[in-house]
Amino acid sequence: MHYIIANWKSHKTAAEAEEWLTAFAAQQMSIANETEVIVAAPFSLLAAVASALKVPALSHLKLAVQDISPFPAGAYTGAVSVRNLAGFGVEYAILGHSERRRYFHETHQEIANKIDQCLSAGITPIVCVDNEYIVEQAAAIPDEHRSQCLVAYEDLAAIGTGNNTALAEVLEQFKIIKAAFGEVPTIYGGSVNGSNTKEYLAHSDGVLVGTASLKVEDFLAVINAA
Ligand code: PGA
């Protein structure tokens, strides 16, 4: 299985999301077998995106969130719990993205708690790691949860810079990930675009796409390369 994940981060308005989905639907893309195309939308757009995905032309797209509360439903003002996602059809959650670690000071333990929450709700965690802390992050996650994660390797220097990490380096990091997490699917992220996707997909289980997921034509180029 190949996972192609659009990470919209905090970019889009509801109108822009609708425009993107309408343009995507109009392409009537045939998605290769064994390929899962996932859109990670901001919480505020989940209802709109979930509703758009009900049309047949978009029914092959899967929905993800970009974060989740480390706590269950309850008195946690401002947090979005897995219970709050009920009914939206969210199947995946990007967790521990380096932007969350860097700007929101998330710890390995908090990310492990978020993984716990997701798994309790049947949501598959896509755990992001950089080379400095693969082993520490894995160690914070209980064994039985670790094997249920997809793990995305993203070098900070490659995110949003146009400097995608050399394949040889990515493969080295995948080895470290598999040693720490077990035989989990490994995904590459960091300046993925239509021109470099094929190379990464030949050696990985997927790509996590930020900048090149924002314009529908750029994202279609990634899918077409798959
Ligand atoms: P990028 O972002 O494709 O813009 O490098 C990837 C990510 O942060 O997941």
Image (cartoon, helix red, strand yellow):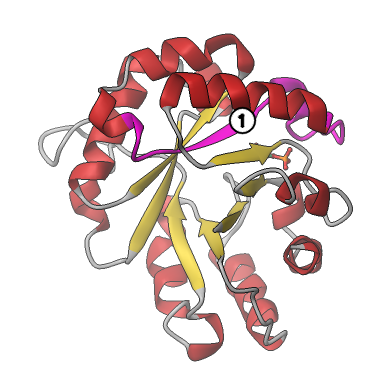
> Judging from the image, what secondary structure is the residue with disc 1 in?
strand
Q: What stretch is highlighted in magenta?
A: 146-166
Would residue 225 appear left or right of 100 to someone viewing this image? right
Circle 1 is placed at which residue position? 153
Would residue 145 appear left or right of 124 to someone viewing this image? left
Q: Quadrant of ligand 1?
A: top right
Question: Where, quadrant-wise, is the N terminus in this rendering?
Answer: bottom right
Question: Where, quadrant-wise, is the C terminus in this rendering?
Answer: bottom right
Image coordinates for residue 116, horizontal then vertical, percent: 23, 34
- Residue 81 seen in render: no
What residue do we see at 66% from left, 71% from top? 20
What residue do we see at 58% from left, 45% from top? 9
Task: Indicate whether 177 appears above or below 47.
Answer: above
Task: Indicate whether 124 appears above or below 166.
Answer: below
In the image, 32 versus 182, the foreground residue is 182
Amino acid carrying label 1: it is Tyr
In the image, 148 versus 6, the foreground residue is 148
